[in-house]
Image (cartoon, helix red, strand yellow):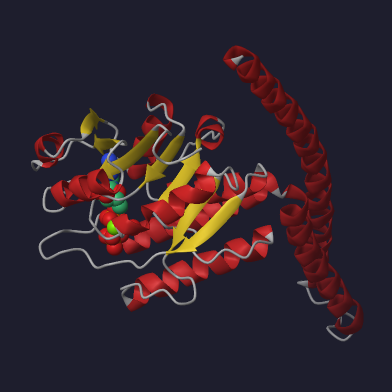
Amino acid sequence: MPEQSAKIAVLVPCLNEAISIHKVVKDFKSELPAADIYVFDNDSTDDTARIAKEAGAIVFKETRRGKGYVIQSMFQQVEADAYVLVDGDDTYPPQAVHRLLAPILANETDMVVGSRLQKGTQSQFNALNRLGNWFFALILNLFFGTHLTDILSGYRAFNRRFVNGMPLFSGGFEIETELTIKAIQRGYRILEVPVDLKRRSEGSESKVQLVRDGILILATIMALFRDYKPLTFFGILGLILFCVGMTSITIIGTTGNLAGGSILLLPWTILSVVVILVSLLAMSIGIILHTIDRRFQEFESRTRSMAQRYSDSEEK
Ligand SMILES: Nc1nc2c(ncn2[C@@H]2O[C@H](COP(=O)(O)OP(=O)(O)OP(=O)(O)O)[C@@H](O)[C@H]2O)c(=O)[nH]1
Ligand SMILES: [Mg+2]
C-alpha cells in the first residue's frame, strides 16, 4: 500500500510536554501531510493539550496516569491502516518515520522498532540509561531466544492486525517490554531499524524514575517469562532446587557420621528432603502449565484465523 493512500495515525503519548509538543506535531505533519496526529494527554498540568490542538493534532484525554494506560487507550480508540507511536518529547527523528512505515505498508512485517542502540547509531544516552537498555535486552534475548537490540524504544510502527490483536495490561513504562514480548510470543514479525536518539531540550523533564521503572520492567520480563515459557522457568527453578537438595544430602551422607549425631542433623536432613520434593513439584507445575499453554495457543490461533476470515468476508 503506498504511503499516500494509506490511512496513517501518528500516536503521541504526552504528560507535560508543552515545551516540545508543537514541534513534534508540526514535524510529523510535514513528514506525513495526510496522516492524523493523535496526542493523548494524561491530565497534563501544563498547556500540552492546547498547544497540541493549535498545532493541528486531534487531542484525546486519558485520566489514568501512565504511558501504558495511554497506549491501551490508543489501541482501542484509533482506527487506521498503519500506526506510528512516538514520544512527545522531541527526542526521536521525524525524518526516520518513512523508514519505519515502509516495511509495514509493504506488509513485510507487523511491528517496526526504531532501535536507538543498533550498530552505527549515535544516540545521546546517559551511561545509566545505556547500561539499563543493554541489560534488559540481554536478559530478554536470553529468555526468549531473540536478537533484539532495543526493547524499550518509544518509536515504533504497527499494522492494523497487530494493534487489533494485542492484549495489553501494563500501566506504566513497562508497556514497551510487554509489547515486545507479546509480539514475539504471538509470532508477529518484528523488524528493527536504526534511529538516533536526541537529548530532551533544555527545561523539558523526563518522566522515568530509574529505580522504580527499572524494577517494573524487570518484573514484567520475569512474569511474562513465567507465563509464556513455564516449562523453562519452572524447569530451571526445579533443577536448581534439586541440585541444592542433593548436594545437601550428599554432604550429610559424607560428614553426618563425623558430626557424631549432632542435633542439627535431623532438621537438616528433613529440610534437604523438602527441598528435593519442592524441586519435583516445580518441574511438575512446569509440565502442566506448558501443556495448558499449548492448548491455549492452539485456541488463540484458531480464534485469530476465524476473526481474519470474518473480516476478509466483511471487506468483500
Ligand atoms: N500520556 C502519558 N504520557 C506519558 C506518561 N508518562 C510519560 N509519558 C509520555 O511518554 C513519552 C516517554 O516518556 P519519557 O519521560 O520521555 O521517557 P523516556 O523516553 O523513556 O525517557 P527520557 O526521554 O530519557 O526522559 C513522553 O512523550 C511522555 O510525555 C503518562 O503518564 N501519560
Ligand atoms: Mg523520551
Closer-to-camera residue (115/300) = 115
Residue 78, percent across and down?
Answer: 38, 28
Closer-to-camera residue (72/257) = 72
Residue shown at the point (14%, 36%) measured from the top left: 49
Q: Is any part of residue 71 visible from this angle?
A: yes
Q: For the view shown, which residue lies furthest in the bottom direction?
A: 258
Number of on-image labels: 0
Residue 40, percent across and down?
Answer: 26, 36
Residue shown at the point (66%, 41%) measured from the top left: 186
Say above or below: 258 vs 96.
below
Residue 267, percent across and down?
Answer: 77, 64
Closer-to-camera residue (73/135) = 73
Ligand 2 placement by image quarter: bottom left
Q: Dividing the image into 4 quarters, which one contains the C terminus?
A: top right
Say above or below: 197 vs 227.
below
Say above or below: 119 vs 187.
below
Q: Is any part of residue 155 visible from this angle?
A: no
Residue 31, percent across and down?
Answer: 29, 49
Q: Is residue 61 left or right of residue 67?
A: left
Residue shown at the point (81%, 49%) measured from the top left: 281
> Which quarter of the picture shows residue 182?
top right
Q: Is residue 219 left or right of residue 172?
A: right
Residue shown at the point (30%, 73%) measured from the top left: 124
> Which quarter of the picture shows residue 290?
top right
